[in-house]
Amino acid sequence: LSCQPAQGLHEATLLLGLLSLEAVLEAEATRTLLATADVSPSAAAGGMPIWRVYGGRTCEETLPGGQPLLAAAVELGSEIVGACAAAAAPSLPLAARAVGLLHRLLAHRASSGVGLPAVEWGSLVVRVFDLARCLATHPHLASSPSGAELAARLLGLLHHLLLCSEP
């Protein structure tokens, strides 16, 4: 049998992250906490650990305090979009879900009026364009119903990014 459980496990892990963030956005109390709770309320804590993937390796970094938890959620959403763009055979439903969630997180940021100074906006935009390029260079992906949904969500997210004041 030829199977690659690592790919399925990777997708399942990304999906779990997305589902967790979606659940946080659904409830009013947790949605409010995203915009009001500091990622690191005490100076002694030094910041909130956040894990990033560089060249297939996971690295722990620290998201500095003085900003809402929403910054960590946006960073995680951006990382998932980047992972989808980097996949040899991206899961279009997972990518569409990630882009939709990232759009909802940024809309929540805009409606709550909070700033996210530590979000790497340049990296976020690059990841979104990388995913769009991935879709555009694989006509068989773009012509599928999942590809059309992803393209529509990418356009909505890019439109939002162009209109918002931060970045």
Image (cartoon, helix red, strand yellow):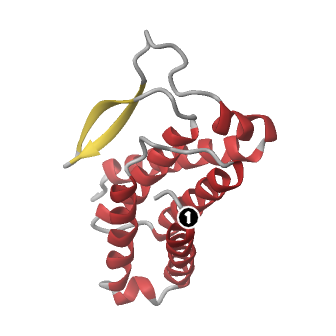
Point out residue 94 in the picture as x, y percentages from the top left corner.
50, 62
Point out residue 50 in the picture as x, y percentages from the top left corner.
39, 32
Task: Count neighbours of disc 1 (C-alpha within 10 A) and say few if under 14, some if 14 to 19, many if 20 or more.
Answer: few
Q: Secondary structure at mark 1?
A: loop
- Which residue is drawn at the image coordinates 33% and 56% (left, top)? 123
Asked whether 100 or 74 is in front, the reply is 74
Residue 10 versus residue 29 in the image, above or below: below
Point out residue 160 in the picture as x, y percentages from the top left corner.
57, 69
Furthest-right residue in this view: 28
- Which residue is drawn at the image coordinates 26% and 34% (left, top)? 59
**Location of mark 1 (residue):** 164
Point out residue 95 in the picture as x, y percentages from the top left corner.
47, 65
Left or right, 29 with respect to 117, comes to: right
Asked whether 160 or 114 is in front, the reply is 114
- Which residue is drawn at the image coordinates 40% and 17% (left, top)? 46
Q: Quadrant of residue 153?
A: bottom right
Asked whether 3 or 47 is in front, the reply is 47
Image quarter where the N terminus lies is: bottom left
Residue 19 versus residue 82 in the image, above or below: above
Residue 88 versus residue 141 in the image, above or below: above
Furthest-top residue in this view: 44
Left or right, 56 with respect to 72, comes to: left
Residue 109 versus residue 46 in the image, above or below: below
Asked whether 87 or 120 is in front, the reply is 120
Q: Quadrant of residue 23?
A: top right
Inspect the image, locate mark 1, and give the three-letter code of the amino acid beneath it: Cys
